[in-house]
Image (cartoon, helix red, strand yellow):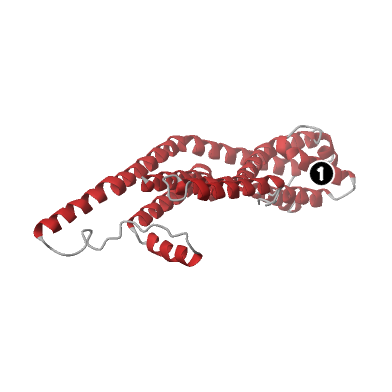
Amino acid sequence: MVNFKFSRKNQVAIGLGILILLIDFYFFFGKIFFVPVIAVAVTTAWLPFWLGIFAENKRQKEIETRFPDFVRNLTGAIKSGMPASQAVINVADTDYGSLTPFVKKFSNQIEWAIPFHKAFLSFGMETGNTVIRRAIATMIQAEQAGGNIEDVLIAITDSLIEIKKIKEERKSGIHAQIMQSYVIFFVFIGIMVLIQNLLIPYMSNFGAEQTTALGIAGQASGGLNLDAPLDFTSPASLISSFSLWVVSLKGIFLLLALIQGFFAGIVLGKLAEGDMTSGLKHSLIMMTLAFMAMSLAQSI
């Protein structure tokens, strides 16, 4: 679980995003880059929050990867004849990357005469990793049911290694599909831009010419609302114009691109890493690029 901390870095990012937004309204209001710069301002403001989430996910993956090394060393120390508590203290000096602080705390609790099982459960809870918590709970239950702690630790290590191999194989096997999905998404955005900027205006103009030639009164577009510019003169005007923009052709196209980017990213994360949270990384990338591309194309 990610702990959200409103650090100074987040405050600076929000302030910078607000500054970019003010500059956008002052210099680019009503111009071609007005809406894309809004996307830049929003991205700048929330970027540190999401980078923190991705950094925590990366740290959790390293913790999960290094845990079998710790269990393997612990098993070897126990096999050499050490009690489980002494074995923890003995292997705590080894470097386990992001797992090291938790191992050190585990060792300190043992030295403070906290029971091994209680300290081990606390160790699993402190890591915040679901896989590790389940493995430790399974180990303790198996030992209390009469199993040998060495055999239980070996079985857990083998199980974690197999899980790691399966995840790596899935990730390597899906890599080509990830690249293919990004290419398909960019082609989708390109087609949307072409339809929005070339095909629809051409059909509207063609319909207008036919209507004029036949002498028929009425709207050339057949009632289709191609665009509804946003009105920033007042909050009420903005809300009213936004409701019209959402049901306009440009609003629908932009929303379709954002929806496609969001769900395509979620699916990629689920397929590649088995975790929908990891898919948010792809979703954010796709949605940001889609918003900037579509809004820039709509401004032309």
Q: Residue furthest left?
A: 214
Quadrant of residue 157 within the rendered picture: top right
Q: Nearer the viewer, residue 77 or 175?
A: 175
Q: Nearer the viewer, residue 69 or 288?
A: 288
**Residue 93 percent location from the top left of the image:** 81, 33
Judging by the rendered image, the residue that carries numbered circle 1 is 105
**Residue 279 percent location from the top left of the image:** 51, 47
For image coordinates 42% across by 47% down, the residue present is: 31
**Residue 67 percent location from the top left of the image:** 69, 39
Does residue 251 appear in this view? yes
**Residue 19 percent location from the top left of the image:** 59, 47
Decide: is 233 above or below 278: below
For image coordinates 68% across by 38% down, the residue present is: 68
Inspect the image, locate mark 1, and give the three-letter code of the amino acid beneath it.
Lys
Q: In the rendered view, does 212 fall on the left or right side of 147? A: left
Q: Nearer the viewer, residue 238 or 243?
A: 238
Q: In the rendered view, does 8 fall on the left or right side of 88? A: left
Q: Identify the secondary structure beneath mark 1.
A: helix
Q: Nearer the viewer, residue 142 or 275?
A: 275
For image coordinates 33% across by 45% down, the residue present is: 193
